[in-house]
Amino acid sequence: MSDDVTELPGEDPQANGLRGAVGMLAPRWRAILVATLSICLFTGASLAKPLVIQYALDRGVADGDRGALVVAGTLFLGLIVVIYAFQAASTYLVNRIGQDFLRELRVRLFTHYQRMSLAFFGRENAGRLVARMTSDVATINDVLNNGFLMVVQSTLTLLGATVILLVLSWKLSLATAIILPPLIIATAIFRVYSRRAYGSVRERIADVLIHMQESFSGLRVVQAFAREQHNMERFGSINERNYEANVNTVRISAMYFPVVEWLSGLGIGVILYFGGRQVAGDAVTVGTVTAFVFYLEFIFQPIQNLSQVYDMVQSAGAALNKIFGVLGIKPDVPEPAKPAKVEGNLRGRIALDDVTFGYDPGRPVLAHITLGIEPGQHVVLVGPTGAGKSTLAKLMTRFYDPTEGRVEIDGYDLRSLAAKDLRRNVTLVPQEGFLFTGTIRENILFGRPDADDTAVVAACETLGIHDFIMSLPNGYQTLVSFRGSRLSAGEKQLVSIARAFLADPPVLILDEATSSLDPATEEQVEEALRRLLKGRTSVVIAHRLSTAEHADRVLVVDRGTIVEEGHHRELLARGGYYSALYRQWTAGREVRSA
Ligand SMILES: Nc1ncnc2c1ncn2[C@@H]1O[C@H](COP(=O)(O)OP(=O)(O)OP(=O)(O)O)[C@@H](O)[C@H]1O
Ligand SMILES: [Mg+2]
């Protein structure tokens, strides 16, 4: 796998983020229309200001018409009010539409992630999935906050000013246009250098952060080897490079902005010189020349703005494509369009009908398995490593769908059940119990959030782990991921057993832990498990054959098929695969305990 942190396997690199974004924005067309109109209105009003000045100078001052001055003054005030009102309105609207959009995008991503199968999270790197929700969304946020308004306003201003200038005097416009090529070239050069410079600033900042983080987490080693001085020197040089990178951006800006200033001065000079000569020849008015000087700013500012937001818009486009690429990944186990109606709990009869499955459909891991498990039956799966036991368990809990055949519970094809109905009835207890940040109580309640404390305590008493929990510093309120009170592997298993017990599903699938616990904890875990499984349909993947001794039925899996089945004693008596496995295991146990 490549180290490229920007692309996820399974992600559609051709994903069209723009189409996706338009699709999401379409229902908000009214707000967008109002916002666009507001932008047009205040941009138009800004563009009209020099025209009013022109009118005041030509009609009011040159022609000595006082009434024209009053009209011009009033118009100007009116324009300023319009600009204020609609600029405020459009800033607010654009940002609100943007935040609405981002909120929905985050919800979509999160919902999408939650719907993805375990297989997906096995394949993908969690950091990248989080990046889609954080840094990519932040990039889009930047554009929505600052960029979008600027792009629309600058484009409108640029186009509007150009048209007005051409209409006012195309000759003077052409003369002024000589400053455009150097401005555009200078801006293009600036953009290339500044993009490079800001890219290196970002890298240098990352270096500083990485070094700091590494030094803090490795501080004990640093101090143990008295390497503080060396560490300081390394940090010094990294920090120095960060400084250089930043100064470089300043240097580039320091060269560019005075050039713009100078070109703008040149433009005014051109206008005054050519315009002034034309005024003398009566070709244009003083008001027109003045308006030209003002409009020059309306050409300069948008060009600079647009070049600034160009990169921003580009990275936001890339981020959008990536996000919609992830959103385009199809869930491996889709929700049924019309889920079967399930009332209350199922009885827990499991049936596999000629099931064939391969992670890669071309290479089956399980082949033609047909199997029925009665409600309440306690089934144990045994077999060599890589035989397909865990895969079988994943099919029964619908973490995958079979390539061929069907898996049923109480006659319902698993594919026809809504995920919530399936999970309420079939629970997988994973080998190493996973606990969320929070208290033990919260972790147990995870299985059935509406339960109360009495139910939690009752569950733990039934399982025989109440005393253990009460022996912890804060009892049920003990924080599980708090440094000092981190639980041992066995204790975590006990909590996750209690979680499953409280959820109380009719079917339990259990992958027995391979990591060994100390005998006392092991005894406690086994006792809790026995009580958990009582009265339920259960399928336990056993790594210790002692687990198989108490099963109603043992299934021996080898190379993707069930090669033997029956009760422990029957299988031993048959003298086949299982009895050989058992002899091997007991011999191993004697060696282990010797
Ligand atoms: N996510 C996966 N992608 C591709 N192949 C897989 C995946 N998980 C398991 N396999 C393959 O499927 C086969 C069966 O694996 P499975 O995990 O079901 O074996 P198992 O019987 O549970 O073994 P163990 O006793 O070691 O847990 C193996 O050949 C394994 O390499
Ligand atoms: Mg396994």
Image (cartoon, grey):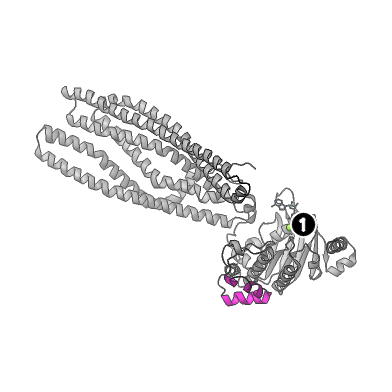
Q: Name the residue under label 1.
A: 368
x 57%, y 43%: residue: 229
Residue 70 lies, in percent from the top left, at 12, 42
- Magenta span: chief secondary structure: helix
Region rendered in magenta: 450-479
Mark 1 residue element: strand
Give the camera-side residue of 404 and 318.
Answer: 318
- Rate crowding at label 1 as few (under 14), some (14 to 19) or many (20 or more) other CA atoms within 10 Å: some
x 71%, y 50%: residue: 361
The quadrant of the rendering that contains the C terminus is: bottom right
Residue 192 lies, in percent from the top left, at 45, 32
Q: In this view, does 493 lie above or below 262?
A: below
- Confirm whether residue 329 shows in the render: no
x 63%, y 69%: residue: 499
Q: Quadrant of ligand 2?
A: bottom right
Q: What residue type is labelled 1?
A: His
